[in-house]
Amino acid sequence: MKISGFHYLNLLIVFTFLQQAVVANPLGFSDERVKEIYVSPLGDDDGAGTKNDPFATFDRALRETKAYAGKQAVTVWFSEGTYYLEETIRIGSEYSGTDSNPVTFAASPGAKVTIKGSQRLDNLQWAAYKEGIYVTSIPSDLEEVDQLFVNGNRQVRARFPNYDDQNPLRGGEGYIQVTGGMNERYDEWFSYDPETFTEKEWAHPETGIVHAFQSHNWGNMQYAIKEVDRSSNKVYLGEGGWQLQRKYGIGGKGSKSSWYFIENIFEELDDPGEWYVDHEENLLYYYPPAGVNLSEAMVEVPVVNDLIQLMGSPSSPVRHIQFKGFRFTQSNYTFMDEYEPLARGDWAIHRGGAVFMEGAEHCLVEDCAFEYLGGNGVFMSAYNRENVVRGCQFVHLGESAVCFVGDPSSVRFYQTWDDSELLGKDWVKMREGMDMEPGPKTPDYPKNCVVENSIMHDFGDVGKQVAGIYISMSFKIRASHNTIYNCPRAGICINDGTWGGHIIEHSDIWETVRETGEHGPFNSWGRERQWRGSRGKDDQFLKELTKLDALENVIVRNNRIANYRKSISAGNWTIDLDDGSSYFEIYNNLNLGSTIKLRDGMARKVYNNITVSAVPLGWHVWPKESEDEIYQNIFVIAGAIPGNEQPTRNFIRPVGLPSDTKWSEHYDRNLYWNYNFPVDFLVTESKDMKAWLAEGYDKNSLVADPQFVDPLNGNYQVSEDSPALALGFENFPMDKFGHQMTRIVPFGGEFEEDIKVELKKDLRAKDGGKVYFTLDGSAPTIHSLEYNGEFILDKNTTVRAQTFDANGLPVGFEMKADFEKVEKVIYPSWLQTLLAGKYQGDVVAADQALVKEVAGATLVNIKDDPDLIDATGGYDYGCYIRSLDEDKGAMWGDAGLEQDWVIQQVNGVTVRNITSLERELAKYHNQDVEVTAARDYSTSTFTVKVP
């Protein structure tokens, strides 16, 4: 094709114009008539809002957008610096943009912009108080101060025991255990050991806040203190305890009792970094740590809960609002604010977040950092459609990172645990006249929303029943390429079965469930209209109702989920489908250190997964004809369960499954390999492979080494001659897990002689993007080392890496990883065994749960068997009935007791184990006794005639 000079010149002019437009408009909006508004910490709200005469505040810039919103694209550029919010920024539908003309609030290219929900306290007049403590007056209009930041660092409110910065988790020296308590919400008191309790006398105990773990370790609670009675060694409690559901409170016995600490007590101000505010006198007391010069220190206190709220409605939504490149920090704690019990998941939640959306559509939060916030990060409440959180980082939040939570009004039949356990409502009676229409009742729920390519770690600083991603009463939520680690409970939690359609993919999750128990890095519940109890029986699980709420399958695929930790209480899994979870499709997942649990539910398809651990598969209380399918997986057993010195022999631990029908009609073509016992392994505790095959399962499966390519370096694909391939197993990518921003591979850790390190650039950096890094602990810049290929470390090193684009501007977040050279790397038992090809350790007698026959009933001490605790509803004491002999066990059977009940009382006396049961029964020869037993989250009493 020939181009004339005239046409060539025209094309050149057009091309040059487009280039200039892109530079002037780096966000790339379609309308070149972008209205640009400028904000600077050095600006003036009486200015024009131009580049040369910028506004000073977010609020003023927001008001300026109203005249242009929806008519043309609007970009509000924030210059580098800190912007303090005196109150929440509220954005209603009148500020909405359109698809082609969005309203965007953005950090200027390359600028570090921080939005703080705090007030800076200037001109403080510090005076020495005593023993290293200083005091100053603060403004009288400050409401309750719950946090103090000094030079950007969150300080510790005066507490007992003192904060343990080496191990701040439950069980560290910063916690202590109760000696007793009501163990029932709402708790009124707990007792303490006077030998370990503080000796300091508290003039005002009523200022104190108790942070205590629930006795079952499903989360924690906070209570205000009423008083301390030293004569009875009791702490009496006021308001609080609403931060989770379920009836259990503060209590327990011995090593199993609740851990707690108490904060906001003036007399406990005795450790560097601690502080206390006397609101009666408007005085701030502070014990500065070494290196803090109070005359120069920046002192800040949070004053705002939600930093930004997008507030619309289904009929008048907020549309096409975007936030890009901000750092959000320093908001109030919310743990003593209103919490809401959510359906029949175990959660309660505070509807709030640094960025809170309700009635929002097509809104975007991108490239934002959420750090040191008092509550949740991003919260989508009730009606939300097509909103996206992308390329963000969430670190040190008081609660969860990203939450999608519908309104109960959208659920056709709504029940909570609080209804039954606190308010005394009868769940069965509540079902009378139950709405039998499928799906949601109103549009007040999140749908088609996304969280992707984000990092969530070290959150749950205050609340412990938290998640990186939390989903409740929502439809078609997609969570993709998220990295989640270092948190007290779930990486990802789906609270209920309304309404499915979610996609959980390409996650990289590890070091979760660190302070709680009976959970998994991925956890779900589904206690909806079909669910009447937890045993999966026909009268408790109404299969025909399942699809009323579970409208579409939940897909869990292409995730790497690791769970190496010793269980705190009951079982810890990788993928934990708890009560009622139905219609899941689980495939292409790499499960390391633990394995998959399926509790009562319908139609779970589990295929093409890899599990490598010492933990047997947890198949618990499936309904008859559940339509569950288990096929073309690789199941590997290796090593011993953490806390247990006995190598695992069996692949499956079934509890309460149907005994008169097959568990599944499609359980086949799986590959099994037990590195501990390659020959004399068991499939279940009571069946070898021959007996298992006779049951009709795994007819075409194989027992063989899967031949992983390079497990030490994370490649669990199988070799081309692996027998798994002949069974239909297909390799899936091992390098697509987690976020796709700047990455350091491996992400730190211990090594012996040397270690090879690879850096990967942020995939959003187009041609010309490069990674720069440092090895001396300094922040990387474009003048640092340029990454050109793998490098070797042979000493302790901190690697810091950052992607920069072709213009030298940073892309995404800096990554930091610590590498430590040691004499010997100690791998988890499962990995050590896998690498060696055989069990590494001595086979010793294990501390197994006591099993004993009592009057024809085979009983198990349930507290010593975490899987049973998990499978029976969380009961952590009593005697579990494993089986009943029809003749010898007549005294139990005639009373109505059967398999799977947990005996907990005889004539009102607590039965904690088999020994105490035998002791109580011995008192009543030839007499009737009242035996209280638990099952299905409820108790019943049976009249038993003792021979």
Image: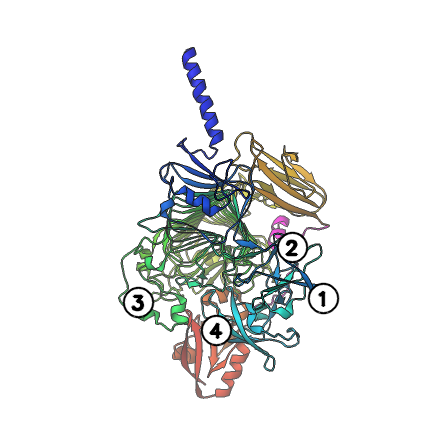
Q: Nearer the viewer, mark 3 or mark 2?
A: 3
Residue 724 % position (x, y) = 50, 44
Q: Which residue is mark 4?
A: 184
Q: Is residue 918 above or below residue 763?
A: below
Mark 3 or mark 1: which is in front? Answer: 1
Q: Disc 3 marks which amino acid?
A: Arg
Q: Quadrant of residue 135?
A: bottom right
C-alpha span from label 3 to label 1? 63 Å
Q: Position of residue 221 (x, y in %)?
A: 51, 66
Mark 1 element type: loop
Q: Amino acid at mark 1?
A: Glu
Label 2: how many Cα within 10 Å (few below 14, some 14–19, many 20+): many
Q: Which mark is residue 431?
A: 3
Q: Secondary structure at mark 4?
A: loop
Give the total number of marks visible in the rendering.
4
Q: Earlier in the sequence, mark 3 or mark 4?
A: 4
Quadrant assignment for the N terminus:
top left
Q: Residue at x 61, y 80 (%)?
A: 230
Q: Main secondary structure of the magenta part?
A: loop
In this view of the protein, which residue sits in the foreground, 859 or 466? 466
Magenta residues (range): 823-849
Amino acid found under the numbered disc labelled 4 = Glu
Give how far apart the Cα atoms at labels 2 and 1 are: 53 Å
Disc 4 from disc 2: Cα separation: 44 Å
Single out the mark in the foreground, 4 or 1.
1
Q: Which residue is mark 2?
A: 840
Instruction: Give the residue type at disc 2.
Output: Gln
On the image, which quarter does residue 773 sit in?
A: top right
Query: Contact, CB < 8 Å: mark 3 with mark 4?
Result: no
